Amino acid sequence: MDLNPSTMPLLFFVFVLAMLLGTELIRKVPSQLHTPLMSGSNAISGISIVGALIAAGRQDSGTAVTILATLAVAFAMINVVGGYLVTDRMLKMFKGKDRKGGR
């Protein structure tokens, strides 16, 4: 896929807007909702991993696309693994509270 140079400012604008809105949204999330939202983020990252793998594996894509797709796979995998580790840790904390107080 060849990018038209005239579309680059629009793509950059969308990228910056997504960053600013995402940052503002994360700041407004209460701590009780952080773990469920992280689980949803892991699912979205899993979808982006599939898309990046498809983009990286295309024979007709250029070197830049392959490099960016490989970076996307790496960063999404870091996000997924880290999210699952944090979610597992949070669930263990809640499980520990249930055992101590009940019986």
Image (cartoon, rainbow, N blue to C red):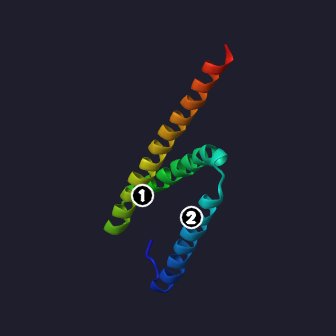
Q: Please tell me whether residue 92 is drawn above or below residue 3 in the rendered image.
A: above
Q: Is residue 39 left or right of residue 64?
A: right
Q: Quadrant of residue 1?
A: bottom left
Of the numbered discs 1 and 2, the one sitting upstream in the chain is: 2
Residue at the spot of label 2: 23
Dot label at residue 72: 1
**Looking at the picture, which amino acid does disc 1 mark?**
Ala
Query: Label 2 neighbourhood size at 10 Å, few (<14), some (14-19), many (20+)?
Result: few
Residue 8 lies, in percent from the top left, at 48, 81
Whole-number angstrom distance, CA of label 1 to CA of label 2: 19 Å
Q: Nearer the viewer, residue 64 or 91?
A: 91
Query: Label 1 neighbourhood size at 10 Å, few (<14), some (14-19), many (20+)?
Result: many
Give me the residue at 56% from left, 70% from top. Answer: 20
Dot label at residue 4: none
Do the residues under discs 1 and 2 have CB atoms within 8 angstroms?
A: no
Question: Which type of secondary structure does the marked residue at label 1 adopt?
Answer: helix
Residue 86 lies, in percent from the top left, at 50, 40
Report the residue that reaches farthest toward the left: 63
Q: Please count the marks in the image.
A: 2
Give me the residue at 47% from left, 38% from top. Answer: 85
Q: Nearer the viewer, residue 85 or 49?
A: 85
